[in-house]
Amino acid sequence: MREIKPLREQILVKLIEDSKSRGGLHLPANMQTAVKVAEVVATGDSRYYAYGKEPITVKAKDIVIFPDGAGFSFTFDGEEYHMVPENSLLAVIVDKL
């Protein structure tokens, strides 16, 4: 079986098509075109800077929001994916305990 392993600060996501995400966030119709809600599938290992590297702040199965047009989409083994740099993510949807 093949899998995709993002490099560096890249985040591999699958869009959540429903207007209400698994995280419970409801997006009005006008916002559905401005931002995308997706589930993280895999992440790169680190962000690299001149002074060193920092770990990625999201993990697989996190629900994230990013602006439409960030990153790029592609098909792999018949599935639609998006690759988005971590610095394009706007938010992570978290459950409040």
Image (cartoon, rainbow, N blue to C red):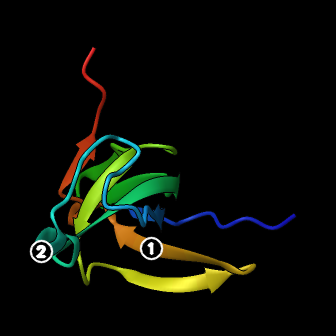
Helix, strand or loop status at disc 2: helix
Image vertical order of residue 72 relative to residue 41, above or below: below
Q: How many marks?
A: 2
Q: Position of residue 18 (x, y in %)?
A: 39, 61
Pick the front one: 37 or 45: 37
Where, by quadrant of the figure, is residue 67 drawn?
A: bottom left
Earlier sequence position, callout 1 versus callout 2:
2
**Which numbered marker is on residue 83?**
1
Judge depth for marks 1 and 2 and give the one in front. Answer: 2
The crowding category of the residue bearing disc 2, from other C-alpha atoms within 10 Å (few below 14, some 14 to 19, many at least 20), is: few
Q: Position of residue 27 (x, y in %)?
A: 20, 59
Q: Residue at x 39, y 59 (%)?
A: 38
Q: Which residue is mark 2?
A: 30
Horizontal and vertical percent position of residue 21: 35, 51
Residue 43 as seen in the image, left or right of residue 88 = right
Percent position of residue 57, x then y: 33, 43
Q: Name the residue type under label 1.
A: Met
Residue shown at 33% from the left, 59% from the top: 48
Determine which of the numbered discs, if any, sits on residue 18 in the image: none
Q: Residues within 10 Å of mark 1 (few under 14, many from 20)?
A: many
Name the residue nearer the viewer: 17 or 95: 17
Q: Quick check: 16 above or below 72?
A: above
Amino acid residing under circle 2: Asn
Residue 31 or residue 51, whichever sits in front: 31
Distance (Cα) linking label 1 and label 2: 23 Å
Q: Quadrant of residue 37?
A: bottom left
Does residue 8 appear in this view? no
Picture residue at 23% right of the left edge, 62% below the top: 87
